[in-house]
Amino acid sequence: PVIRLADYRPTPYAIDKVDLEFDLTAERTLVAASLVLSPRAGTAGEPLVLDGGELTLVRIAIDGRELSADDYEASADRLTVKAPPAGSFRLDMTTRLDPAANTKLMGLYRSSGTWCTQCEAEGFRRITYYYDRPDVLSVFTVKITAPKTEAPILLSNGNPVSSGNLEDGRHFAVWHDPWPKPSYLFALVAGDLDAFEDDFTTMSGRKVKLAVYVEKGNAPKAAYAMDSLKRSMKWDEEVFGREYDLDVFNVVAVSDFNMGAMENKGLNIFNDKYVLADPEIATDTDYAGIEAVIAHEYFHNWTGDRITCRDWFQLCLKEGLTVFRDQEFSSDMRSRAVKRISDARLLRSQQFPEDGGPLAHPVRPEQYKEINNFYTATVYEKGAEVIRMLKTLIGDDAFARGMDLYFDRHDGEAATVEQFIASFADASGRDLEPFMVWYREAGTPTVTVEENWDEAARRYRLTLTQETPATPGQQTKKPRVIPVRFGLVGPDGGDMQPSSIAGAEVNGDTLILTQPSHTVTFEGLPSRPVPSLFRGFSAPVKVRQSLSSADLIFLLANDADSFNRWQAGTTLAMTALVKATQQVRAGQAPSFETAPIDALGALLDDPGLDAAFKALLIAVPSENDVAREVAENVDPDAVAAAHQAYRRTVAGRLAARLTAIVAADDAAAGAPYVPDAAGSGRRSLANTALDLLSITGSAEAMALVRRRFETATNMTDRMAALTILVHRGDADAEAALAAFFERFGNVPLVVDKWLSAQASAPLPGALDKVMALTRHPAFSFGNPNRVRALIGAFATSNPTQFGRADGKGFGFVADVISRLDAANPQLAARLLVTFRSWRSYEPKRRAQAETALRSIQIKPQLSRDVADILERTLA
Ligand code: ARG
Ligand code: ZN
């Protein structure tokens, strides 16, 4: 069935209070739920219809009286009480669960022996019958009883109330959460875990006990997560004025988890990938990921928990906003410019293809079949960009006032995007109705820029025309409000100031486009400027602008905006790569201009630029990036050949500098490892340089890689070197892989890196290797991290081998999806998304991909998750 935003109705009953008792044993779990319900105005006596998911009901009573068979209907996925009492009443239900058999990892399940939960979006209904929707808020009290040796730690939401021993080696704990919440924020954990503990004193002086729970022996690896948590708590007080509101805050890391992490009130549950770190096992990227995800889940305490969503169509209300907040946090902790570039890259690589393909949907969708398929880059990342544009549009002060107003007005409520936007309209006095198009319409606008310089009149004109392509179900598009942060760069590299600007609203350094086309006239300029548009990636759009190489090289060297310096370099590289791909397809040898490469070289020499930024400047756009730019009739082998040729050219011209960069990093290697912006920037630059040097395959370069693999003192450098050895098919690659596994084979998160390095190797044997690795003892189809590390990496990071001309790459991934679907539909559906751009391939591969997709479709009993993605992908 299709769920539609337009059909929203409140429930006929409110749930005033919830008591849950979990009786956990290895063999079975009983859940006794006691709900106090009351009819909302005018709904007394209406049937009570609650959601369930694969449930077994063992008892049901109302106000203490057992119901007879005629009074209700209970199926696995629904409970109907036909004629409830007219006033408020108590409903008692007991359900029996089998957490050990719960391979979907939704509801209550076991992960390495720990009982844990994941309820968002619709997992709570797999625990008890309930109004499992975000607009039903209630106060929860939870009692857990469990065998004490198996589960000495018993956790739920809110504050601890009491605990004690029972007979037969059992014990109990009671938790009470004073903050009304929807069911998706419920959580329970019971297990034998170690804790890394600390505390935090809030701005009003309240002391909060903090703990990060991990598997036995792993407590030291939680230190960075704890540090990130304390910094997040402080930052949210300082920047958003938000204080924590319970006596305890607990984080639990589990090894089987479908997503990244979950913001359950007072009890965040994490994929251990986003908790566990030390220099031996974690890379700089892992550290940054932990910092961001810990912050993200913590920030949800206000944007998600205190103010939640009225319905799942409003998912971006909490996710887009919370991503925006975690991005700001990371920018403040590290380098703002570097963070902005990484976020733009992520958006372009994940969200743009989604928006331009069969799975395109608005930031705030209007219908869905399976909500789990809408935890997407569009809702999260584009949702964050929309907030950032809003801030640019109304300015920092109005944005801050709007946030305060939103918190004041809607604290304790389940809100909508309209209510959120109304706070900013009221705070700024700006009509934001035109801005709502960003929420309502899918698709990435293209802004085409044409310029005209009138030397005699000293008048400069820019014509900016926007167009958004049709997306599934939305044929025509309205013009959007597009903030264009800009500068007109003069010959000295500084921004020139025109005497007047006409043709569009101007707000400081920002032009605001509202019409399909604007011609903006700048008067009184001494000479033709070089336009620097969309500074800081001020809008999530594609820009079509034909700046000359000379202009781009000038911006690369001079733009005051670091994002646009990087952008100019990327545009130059991309232009070269696309042209080279065309040459390869035409049977010609690719050729490259040298001036842009020399310009990069000059930047490498600039002591004023930080290393992380330099690393981004010399990072060549990926093969997937190039394929996206090519857009149709893509031949991944041609892209790869062009990519290889380009990197060889860059490596050749910059060899001396790249070698010096690696040498400088070697010299710094003795210093203690610090995963901060400076340290990670230095490593990132050195490893990018090493990767480029290795592309030539020269004996010296490969010897350098081997030496770095052997002498590495941290996982970042070790993994970078291992990946190069494996991807170049180096003679020592197998030995290096064996040595690496020998050392880290017992650390699953490191095994994931080992799997991914092999799965992403651009070599003809990669598919056979991946197939063999599915039978390796360290691999398991039951663990989402292992599956993503091996199969996910193959499908997303190995364009030539996934996209093999014989279709075997597609066929293999399709088989895995079919095989996974029954056990874990969410995981299977995620993997299926890797096919979303299948129509961009050249005809032969397109047909092969379609055959693979159809092979999934003919399987009986597809999950709703997979059926939904498949149907849209093939439509
Ligand atoms: N709210 C979580 C987060 O972004 C994501 C949970 C999604 N889980 C799911 N099964 N759809 O922080
Ligand atoms: Zn989130």
Image (cartoon, rainbow, N blue to C red):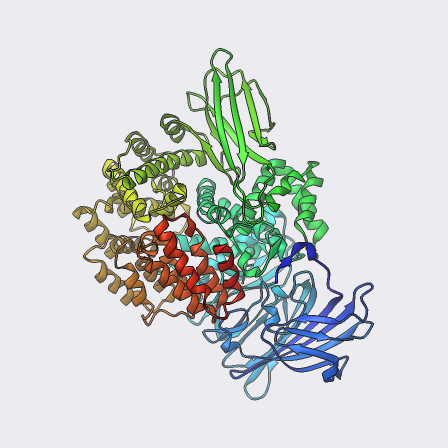
| Residue 315, percent from left and from top | 60, 54
Quadrant in the rendering for residue 480: top right
Numbered disc total: 0
User: Is residue 867 at all visible to an observer of this figure?
Assistant: yes
Q: Is residue 125 above or below residue 436?
A: below
Instruction: Judge left or right: residue 334 versus residue 309.
Output: left
Nearest the eye: 818 or 249 = 818
Instruction: Judge left or right: residue 253 versus residue 363.
Output: left
Quadrant in the rendering for residue 711: bottom left
Q: Is residue 607 above or below residue 637?
A: above
| Residue 28, percent from left and from top | 55, 83
| Residue 129, percent from left and from top | 65, 73
User: Is residue 786 at all visible to an observer of this figure?
Assistant: no
Quadrant in the rendering for residue 511: top right
| Residue 121, percent from left and from top | 58, 63
Residue at the (51%, 82%) spot, across then down: 26
